[in-house]
């Protein structure tokens, strides 16, 4: 089944196809976001996420936006 056939079938059934983004988290602060620091010294951002593209800052509604993806464990496959 080609992509066009898949889109047509989804539309016929009342659905639409949407691309999965290449990031898991977004915020309007540069990485690491100081607002995601917990009182015990741990970070939500730094402990769980890494910047998707650290040298490129994106624009969201005319504001700088940082996109991050979850860190992968040693045993975790790259595809999942």
Image (tube, helix red, strand yellow):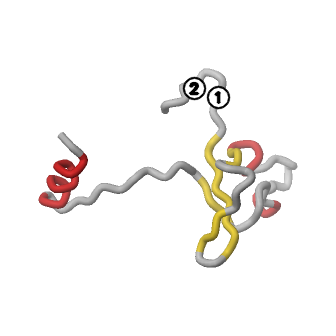
Among the 4 quarters of the image, the one containing residue 65: bottom right
Q: Residues within 10 Å of mark 1 (few under 14, many from 20)?
A: few
- Horizontal side of 11 relative to 22 (left or right) equals left
Query: From this viewpoint, which residue is outermost toward the bottom?
Result: 62
Among the 4 quarters of the image, the one containing residue 36: bottom right
Quarter of the image that includes the N terminus:
top left
Q: Position of residue 18 (x, y in %)?
A: 36, 56
Relative depth, front residue between 22 and 27: 22
The local secondary structure at tag 2 comes to loop
Q: Residue at x 53, y 49 (%)?
A: 22
- Horizontal side of 54 relative to 61 (left or right) equals right
Q: Residue at x 21, y 51 (%)?
A: 4
Q: Residues within 10 Å of mark 2 (few under 14, many from 20)?
A: few
Tally of marks: 2
Q: Position of residue 61 (x, y in %)?
A: 59, 77
Q: Which residue is mark 2?
A: 76
Q: Position of residue 45 (x, y in %)?
A: 73, 51
In this rendering, the answer to whether 76 lies above or below 34 is above
Q: Which residue is mark 1?
A: 73
Relative depth, front residue between 19 and 70: 19
Q: Residue at x 68, y 60 (%)?
A: 66
Q: Are marks 1 and 2 in contact (CB under 8 Å)?
A: yes
Q: Residue at x 69, y 43 (%)?
A: 48
Q: Position of residue 14 (x, y in %)?
A: 18, 62
Query: From this viewpoint, which residue is outermost toward the top?
Result: 75
The mark found on residue 41 in the picture is: none
The local secondary structure at tag 1 comes to loop
Q: Distance between the Cα atoms at labels 1 and 2?
A: 5 Å
């Amino acid at each position: 089944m080609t992509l066009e056939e898949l889109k047509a079938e989804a539309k016929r059934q009342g659905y639409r196809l949407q691309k999965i983004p290449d990031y898991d988290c977004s915020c309007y602060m540069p990485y690491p976001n100081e607002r995601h620091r917990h009182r015990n010294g741990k970070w939500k951002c730094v402990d769980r996420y890494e910047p998707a593209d650290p040298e490129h800052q994106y624009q969201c509604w005319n504001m700088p936006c940082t996109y991050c993806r979850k860190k992968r464990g040693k045993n975790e496959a790259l595809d999942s």
